[in-house]
Image: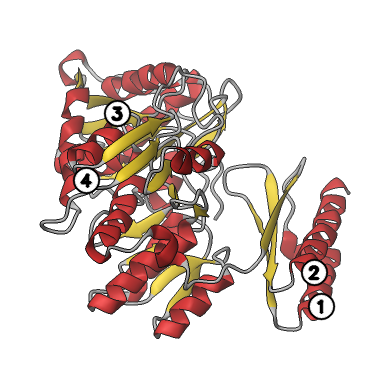
Amino acid sequence: MSRKYFGTDGVRGHVGRHPMTVEFALRLASAAARVLAPDGGSVLIGKDTRLSGYMFESALEAGFVASGVSVKLMGPLPTPGVAYLTQKFGCDFGVVISASHNLYEDNGIKFFDRTGGKLSDALEHAIEARIDEPPTTVESQRLGRAVRTDRERTIYQDFCRSTMPDGVTLEGLKLVVDCANGAAYKVAPRVVADLGAEIVPIGCSPNGRNINDGCGSTQPSLLQLTVPGVRADAGMALDGDGDRVVMVDHLGRTVDGDQLLYVIARHRHVTGTLKGPVVGTVMSNLGLEHALAALGVPFRRAAVGDRYVLELLRETGGELGGESSGHLLCLDKTTTGDGLVSALQVLAIMKQTGAKLAEMVAEMPKYPQILLNVRTPKRIDLSTRPEIAAAVSAAEARFAGQGRIVLRPSGTEPVIRVMAEGQDEALVREVVETLAAVVRQAAAD
């Protein structure tokens, strides 16, 4: 059963267009309260730095309070911080107002359960089933209370520092910290500095409109220039809500989520602390799979989306997984993807081994991988289009077992993602462009 509003990571869209309107947010809050805290309770709300976050925060607050749910308003806080503090404070659920890596014109609303985990499909269906009902207002004596608790973000900062191995600090390292002008702009520089590193902050001056704009994990070019420019040891770039990270080595080269996953997995394997298989997605680079196989480390692929990586980790008993985008899961440390915590694990390995980031990723080959996003005016079911199936079969024949093809609809945007990878970059590009043209034509029919 498909969901009408919830995608792979909550409800998301262009501000002012359904469903990202104040009226919808109010009804969503009322529906969520009836499902997640039917007898009253509490919710923690965090957000990133988008200008529209203020109005959605007010709408959600009104809907929850009117439904008898008390509200803790955390202000700007990374998504994983909301997950952690929801559990820490014993709230019935948590809410994040963010569109992650999108620009400020978009926004979104996503939920965590009382354990700090993503909601199940069943709970999201139950919330959607009640969205069309009029918002609830309980009697005055049962109304919830709203309090602003943004200073308690230091509890999350303490938690992030605690994920470092005992006795390991970042003293002696010079690091550039890019917070994408987003939710982590306060906590990330403070955590890294408190651990002893010399920091150079960029993307830490949000104005409500510059989130993810020319900075952050999706646009790390400024970080790539800054790291060698200031002779830093490495740099980290978070996305707008702080659940993703990519890094840059001392030479200014980007280190993506697949490479970071390899660095952490290899170190844990060598030290005998790796549990279960490493889990990636269908979009993970083939080089990661081959590099882990050379170590004798099993690798599994899940559907795209951290919730599916999490499901497969739990199913297989693994603790480490992630996506190429930098959304990494270290389940022995956190319940959800945390860009800052993931970066700290890599930096700790650098300090423990004395190796540079460039040296640690050198053993993992990265095969040429090209991704094209085909914007579609309407949803199309790829499995029912014979012309697409025929094009894929022809492309796979050209690869002759030396490449991979993935076609999938985005869970957050009206696009079909067309990806191919293989050892021959020219062939990969030709295959992707041919498939994209077929998908574009199918969407137009």
Q: For the residue marked with disc 4, what is the amino acid?
A: Cys
Q: For the residue marked with disc 1, what is the amino acid?
A: Arg
The CA span between labels 1 and 2 is 8 Å
Mark 1 sits on what residue?
A: 398
Question: Can you tell which of label 1 and label 2 is closer to the viewer?
Answer: 2
Residue contact at pointers 4 and 2, CB within 8 angstroms: no
Q: Is residue 425 above or below residue 29?
A: below
Q: Is residue 199 above or below residue 119?
A: above
Residue 348: x percent and y percent? 25, 57
Q: Is residue 444 above or below residue 137?
A: below
The CA span between labels 4 and 1 is 47 Å
Crowding near the residue tagged with mark 1, few <14, some 14–19, many ≥20 C-alpha atoms within 10 Å: some
Q: Residue at the location (15% across, 16% down)?
A: 141
Mark 4 or mark 3: whose residue is earlier in sequence: 4
Viewer can see residue 92? no
Q: Is residue 87 left or right of residue 105?
A: left
Q: Nearest the camera: 359 or 315?
A: 359
Q: Residue at the location (87% across, 52% down)?
A: 441
Mark 1 or mark 2: whose residue is earlier in sequence: 1
Q: For the residue marked with disc 3, what is the amino acid?
A: Lys
Mark 4 sits on what residue?
A: 160
Q: Is residue 378 left or right of residue 179?
A: right
Mark 2 sits on what residue?
A: 427
Mark 3 sits on what residue?
A: 186
Q: Secondary structure at mark 1?
A: helix
Q: How many marks?
A: 4
Residue contact at pointers 1 and 2, CB within 8 angstroms: yes
The CA span between labels 2 and 3 is 45 Å
Q: Is residue 101 left or right of residue 360?
A: right
